Image: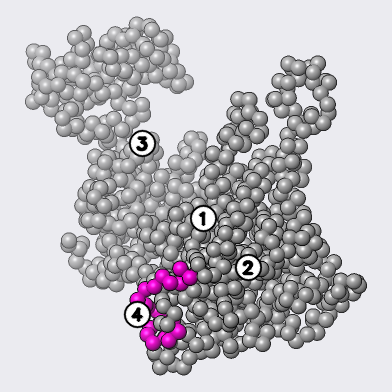
């Protein structure tokens, strides 16, 4: 490649700016370096949970080696003990019951309400939609005290059915909000074609809407599941006995015996307890993220 | 000096060559239009001149300096985008002055330049508005104003009128030409509309599939296309192209279109065709050179022939007639007063002084 | 408003329709159906959110045994206590600094991920979101283990480097640092996702125009990216302020308010007072102190969301 007129200024300019491609490559390398640092920061706890859960109690207690790796062999004894010698399976069962019921209630309520608010205008529907959003902003740490009284009054204290009662307050507003966004983006012509074809509102909802809005419904379901599974405040405040307890509180408080922290056991428990949301995330990541962003950007 | 020079410029995306070796010299102050169908590589070429795309091969020089590795902001160019790309949160004044503010020009000078550009474009009352409040045409003017204030060496336009409605497009075309006459800056303009190319350009560069088909002044491309593609692309409606056979008839040559229809090749054009006698070629004649037989009377190069009209399109000033030769649809342009109706048999006249013959294998115009 | 269906009915069945009971007709009306579909939602929110919120206000004005009405007595009692003043101070510092770092890290990581080629972005985004997916109580448990006085893996590394070990959870300043750190760890991915989506909504051509106008990377951020993202940044920050201010899980698991009640926030202190000590009215009063901040933030969020709707629409 020859440069024109070989003037001093031509080659000076070329040298001063350097290769665009090279600059871009440096920027990319730097991005990766920083990203790796952030990734280490974000992934250290899960990694350490796995390492500790697979370590023998002796290795954990004696700290002879680098705690970040396993030296004395991988052991599954903690997982076995968890399932056989602790109340963990009960917590797991309770959590599953509570979560499944909550998700079911949430989806029915939210889908109905979202459909109504996004397609069928009635007096006050706009206000209601805004109101839903606002109630989402009332935190559970404000509500748990009065709810304690209320739940006690209903005789549901220390029962996981009490959880089924209060968990929807955490999930329904946001799920409705997500789905209002999704339903709203489906063109109204679909409604009109269905009405002309002779469908009732219920038929339109079941046969046309829900299939088309399925991504939004999946995203909302995932959200409801994750929130119910992970809640800590209400079970901490309302549940006392082991047979009613759920995973989050159970793992943190009850796996401790006589003040001796069996960390291998604890980490194994935490790992299994955290697994379902993580698995759902791993397989349905796009829906998960869509649910998150739908709330804030569509609103 | 603000000439632009492209030498053997190539652009590859992975293994696909979007631009296959372009050579183009644009002298200072010239208005050059790159025109061609979608995907021909014209926008890519423009973006390489701007520095928004990396050059895979060859070199581009602006004002005598090779700019292959120079970032856009140092190339001293300005660009008007198809979607205007106005900063939505800034007023018109701020939009236009953005580049100058980045270069830390003194405020007074910025104000002067912006107001002058605004006057040229007629947008002085809009300076405090935001893009959201402007119409499409106004936004386009602001985008042009943003380019003018920079006093660049080269103006680049990337299909700026494609988003406007037909009437506005015609208006803005004139605007752009007027502005170019005023600022006298080298301009490279990309469009897929050949009417824009013909009306705006000093020279037109017709591109197809990553290559330059022909470079020339609008009239040159119209009267002397070098390839079949250019012949068919320039001119609206497009040139009629149909298969024929070149025959010798005594001293002169004839073009046989069907068993019944032949045209004598005029003397003026016989010379260049002689070596191709006997071949199957393509015959080209523009619709404007097919008229009603009564319009001009017969003179040497005009020959009459019969036709049955298929479709008649009155356009006001002229009427387009469509008929068939050998099954292929042919278009002609007649004076509305003399036009027949659909289904009528009429006598049409072809002005063969403007005929073209094309070699079907090479696509070259003979 | 008469629907097509009703028109057809009236056409075919005039005699019968005239005799149909008005309740049936009312049930078929569109707006009624719509309202009925919303009813479960309204009941849940009214009964389990609005009513308890108002009930909390009432409760906060009772005495401990809930027999007498004491007006604002609980509130003044709290305000005079040292511990509570610490709680107010702590919650605020905690919320403001955590949200600031969460937003900052979210913004930086969003830019970094956005710079990557499209294929890799999904992978990295997936990895970096993991903290948000894990139930916070459980991941905080792991952090507790990482900060454990005898077995801390961090201390092991510090000793390996020749530095002295840090009393992560027993020293009040370090304990606060840990609480903020865990909160940032948990919440930053949310900001990453939000800001990444916002970054992608800025049209490429604006950056190209800016490049031609002469902007370098930093100027592009200040003049193009940031103004376009201003609204989403405001919404996410306000939203996170509310959530962080009211946080319970992380503080409870990590420190339970210790050492010496110096890491308590409103939620954990209300828990101690209301549930552990059984003084419901006092607990209610504690939680209610959060209300002003929540209300102000909510108003600003709503304004931001409305403005964003207008911008997009």
Residue at figure coordinates x 43%, y 72% from the top left? A77
The residue that mark 2 highlights is A242
- Of the two numbered discs 4 and 2 in the rendering, the one whose residue sits closer to the viewer: 2
- Of the two numbered discs 2 and 1 in the rendering, the one whose residue sits closer to the viewer: 2
| Residue A205 as seen in the image, left or right of residue B220 | right
Chain to which the residue tagged by mark 4 belongs: A
The residue that mark 3 highlights is B194
Are discs 3 and 1 less than 8 Å apart at CB? no
- In three-dimensional space, the C-alpha distance between marks 1 and 4, rounded to whole angstroms, equals 37 Å
* Label whose residue precedes the other's in the sequence (4 or 2): 4
Determine which quarter of the picture holds residue A18.
bottom left
Mark 4: secondary structure: loop
Q: Residues within 10 Å of mark 1 (few under 14, many from 20)?
A: many
Share a chain, discs 1 and 4?
Answer: yes
The residue that mark 4 highlights is A71
- Of the two numbered discs 1 and 4 in the rendering, the one whose residue sits closer to the viewer: 4
Determine which quarter of the picture holds residue B161.
top left
Eyeballing the image, is A213 above or below A149? Answer: above
Q: Which residues are magenta?
A: A60-82
| Residue B4 as seen in the image, left or right of residue C8 | left
């Amino acid at each position: 490649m020859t440069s024109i007129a070989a003037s001093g200024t031509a080659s000076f300019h070329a040298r001063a700016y350097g290769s665009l491609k090279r600059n871009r490559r440096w920027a990319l390398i730097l991005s990766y370096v920083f990203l790796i640092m952030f990734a280490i920061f974000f992934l250290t706890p899960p990694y350490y949970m796995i390492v500790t859960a697979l370590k023998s109690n002796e290795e954990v207690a004696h700290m002879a080696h680098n705690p970040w790796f396993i030296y004395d062999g991988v052991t599954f004894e903690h997982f076995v003990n968890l399932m056989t010698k602790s109340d963990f399976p009960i917590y797991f069962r309770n959590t599953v019951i509570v979560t499944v019921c909550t998700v079911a209630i949430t989806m029915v309520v939210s889908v109905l309400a979202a459909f109504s608010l996004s397609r069928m205008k009635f007096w006050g529907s706009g206000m209601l939609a805004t109101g839903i959003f606002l109630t989402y902003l009332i935190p559970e740490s404000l509500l748990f005290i009065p709810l304690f009284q209320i739940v006690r009054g209903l005789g549901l204290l220390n029962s996981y059915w009490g959880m089924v009662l209060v968990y929807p307050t955490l999930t329904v507003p946001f799920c409705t909000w997500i789905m209002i966004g999704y339903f709203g983006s489906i063109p109204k012509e679909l409604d009109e074609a269905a009405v002309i074809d002779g469908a009732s509102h219920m038929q339109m909802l079941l046969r046309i809407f829900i299939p088309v809005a399925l991504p939004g419904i999946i995203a909302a379901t995932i959200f409801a599941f994750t929130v119910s599974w992970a809640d800590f405040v209400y079970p901490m405040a309302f549940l006392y006995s082991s047979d009613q307890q759920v995973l989050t509180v159970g793992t943190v408080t009850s796996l401790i015996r006589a003040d001796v922290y069996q960390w291998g056991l604890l980490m194994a428990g935490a790992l299994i307890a955290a697994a379902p949301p993580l698995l759902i995330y791993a397989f349905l990541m796009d829906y998960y993220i869509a649910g998150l962003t739908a709330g804030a950007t569509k609103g | 000096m603000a000439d632009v020079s492209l030498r053997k410029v190539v652009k590859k995306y992975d293994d696909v060559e979007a631009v296959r070796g372009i050579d183009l010299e644009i002298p200072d102050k010239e208005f050059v239009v790159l025109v061609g169908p979608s995907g021909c590589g014209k926008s890519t070429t423009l973006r390489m001149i701007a520095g928004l795309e990396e050059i895979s091969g060859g070199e581009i020089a602006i004002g005598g300096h090779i700019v292959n590795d120079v970032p856009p902001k140092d190339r001293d160019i300005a660009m008007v985008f198809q979607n205007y790309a106005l900063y939505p949160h800034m007023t018109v004044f701020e939009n236009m002055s953005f580049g100058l503010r980045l270069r830390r020009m003194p405020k007074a000078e910025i104000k002067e330049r912006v107001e002058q550009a605004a006057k040229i474009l007629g947008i002085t009352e809009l300076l405090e508005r935001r893009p959201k409040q402007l119409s499409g045409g106004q936004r386009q003017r602001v985008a042009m104003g943003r380019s003018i204030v920079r006093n660049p060496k080269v103006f680049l336009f990337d299909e700026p009128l494609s988003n406007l409605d037909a009437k506005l497009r015609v208006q803005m075309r004139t605007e752009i030409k007027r502005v170019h006459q005023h600022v006298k800056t080298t301009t490279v303009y990309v469009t897929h509309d050949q009417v824009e190319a013909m009306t705006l350009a000093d020279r037109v560069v017709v591109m197809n599939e990553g290559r330059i088909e022909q470079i020339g002044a609008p009239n040159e491309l119209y009267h002397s296309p070098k390839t079949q593609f250019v012949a068919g692309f320039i001119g609206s409606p497009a040139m009629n192209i149909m298969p024929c056979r070149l025959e010798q008839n005594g001293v002169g040559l004839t073009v046989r279109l069907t068993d019944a229809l032949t045209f004598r090749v005029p003397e003026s054009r016989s010379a260049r065709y002689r070596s191709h006698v006997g071949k199957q070629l393509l015959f080209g004649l523009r619709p404007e050179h097919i008229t009603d037989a009564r319009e001009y009377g017969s003179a040497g190069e005009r020959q009459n022939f019969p036709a049955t009209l298929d479709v008649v399109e009155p356009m006001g000033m002229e009427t387009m007639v469509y008929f068939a030769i050998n099954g292929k649809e042919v278009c002609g342009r007649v004076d509305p007063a003399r036009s027949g109706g659909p289904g009528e048999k009429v006598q049409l006249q072809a002005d063969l002084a403007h005929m073209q013959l094309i070699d079907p294998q090479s696509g070259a115009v003979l | 408003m008469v629907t097509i269906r009703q028109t057809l009915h009236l056409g075919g069945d005039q005699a019968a329709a005239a005799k149909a009971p008005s309740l049936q007709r009312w049930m078929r009306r569109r707006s009624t159906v719509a309202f009925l579909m919303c009813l479960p939602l309204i009941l849940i929110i009214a009964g389990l959110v609005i009513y308890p919120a108002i009930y909390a206000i009432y409760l906060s004005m009772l005495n401990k045994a809930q027999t007498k009405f004491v007006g604002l007595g609980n509130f003044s009692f709290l305000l005079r206590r040292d511990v509570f003043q610490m709680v107010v101070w702590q919650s605020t510092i905690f919320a403001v600094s955590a949200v600031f770092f969460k937003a900052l890290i979210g913004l930086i990581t969003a830019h970094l991920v956005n710079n990557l080629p499209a294929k890799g972005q999904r992978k990295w985004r997936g990895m970096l979101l993991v903290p948000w997916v894990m139930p916070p109580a459980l991941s905080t448990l792991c952090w507790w283990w990482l900060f454990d006085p005898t077995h801390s893996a961090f201390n092991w590394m510090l000793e390996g480097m020749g530095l002295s070990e840090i009393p992560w959870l027993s020293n009040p300043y370090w304990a606060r640092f840990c609480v903020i750190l865990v909160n940032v760890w948990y919440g930053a991915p949310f900001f990453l996702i939000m800001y990444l989506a916002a970054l992608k909504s800025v049209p490429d051509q604006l950056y190209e125009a800016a490049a031609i106008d002469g902007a370098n990377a930093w100027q592009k951020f200040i003049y193009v990216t940031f103004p376009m993202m201003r609204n989403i940044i405001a919404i996410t920050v306000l939203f996170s302020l509310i959530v962080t201010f009211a946080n319970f899980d992380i503080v409870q698991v990590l420190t339970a308010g210790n050492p010496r009640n110096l890491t308590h926030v409103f939620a954990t202190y209300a828990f101690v007072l209301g549930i552990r000590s059984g003084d419901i009215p006092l607990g209610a009063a504690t939680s209610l102190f959060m209300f002003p901040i929540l209300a102000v933030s909510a108003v600003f969020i709503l304004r931001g969301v409305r403005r964003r709707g207008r911008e997009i629409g």
